[in-house]
Image: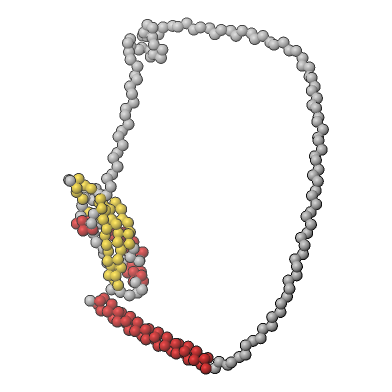
Amino acid sequence: MFGELLIEIQRQKNARRRRIYVFSFTTSVILIGALIVGAIIYALFNIEDLPPPSVAVTFFAAAPPPPPPPPPARKKREQPKPKPVVQPTVQQVKQPLVQPKQKEPEPEPDKEEDHGVEGGVEGGVPGGVVGGVLGGERDNKPPPPPPPKPEPPPKPKVVQATVLESQKISGGIPPLPPNVKEQAFNALGNQPGMLTAIFKVCIGADGAISSINLMKPSGSAALDDFIKSNLKTWRYRPYMIDGKPTPICGTKVFNINLQ
């Protein structure tokens, strides 16, 4: 009630100032117009008849243009002198004859005798293991398949503000601290009024708040931070679709009235 009274008083003050401004502006325009008209009338009645000015005109004949300069003489191109051809001289260098050396035959490596192993298999397989089993199979099992990729989380569904409010269990905005209230008043020009902030709130499948984004600031950064820090403490129940919890997103509007 007190706020509405203050707003009405301020509205009446603004209307009174507007009427005074319009009256002052109209009076100034009329006075300036009267001065301009009076100056024009005064100038019209005090015009003196002046003789037309005499203008002396002198005609000059233009001088003929000078003849064009003669074209420059062409220079004879000097033909380049032929360069003398120098024939290369070839010098023969005698190299001494060197007989190739004969390579000595390399000694053949001694062949190791193939000795059997106790517990082995007659006619064993290369790469076998000592003490293997007759007719055994190699361990060539294929590697296990990779684990399946986890399914991406479902995208949150956008719901109306009333649906988001119906899922709330607890939460609210406490009274503003003195420093936050002072900065909010400064945003209003130290006058009572209302500040509005709009947030986008997303809730996960478990009902916990997953993200909070400021969509429309109130004009006071301290007030926006205070609301956002309190939003993080709110609790919601999971939103069920066909018996399954589903993440949702909705808007929350805060109207803060500063008296």
The answer to whether 129 is drawn above or below residue 185 in the figure is: above
Report the number of numbered marks.
0
The answer to whether 148 is drawn above or below residue 59 in the figure is: above
Residue 30 image position (x, y, % from top left): 42, 88
Displayed quadrant of residue 215: bottom left
Residue at the spot x=67%, y=83% of the render? 55
The answer to whether 201 is drawn above or below residue 85 in the figure is: below
Displayed quadrant of residue 57: bottom right
The quadrant the N terminus occupies is bottom left
The quadrant the C terminus occupies is bottom left
Res. 21 visible in picture: yes
Q: Say which of 59 and 83 sits in front.
A: 59
Residue at the spot x=19%, y=57% of the render? 166
Residue at the spot x=37%, y=84% of the render? 22
Q: Say which of 67 and 72 sits in front.
A: 67
Displayed quadrant of residue 224: bottom left
Res. 182 visible in picture: no
**Residue 85 located left or right of residue 159:** right
**Residue 237 located left or right of residue 211:** left
Q: Say which of 61 and 235 sits in front.
A: 61
Residue 211 image position (x, y, % from top left): 30, 53
Residue 86 image position (x, y, % from top left): 81, 29
Residue 237 image position (x, y, % from top left): 20, 52
Residue at the spot x=26%, y=76% of the render? 3
The answer to whether 131 is drawn above or below residue 62 in the figure is: above
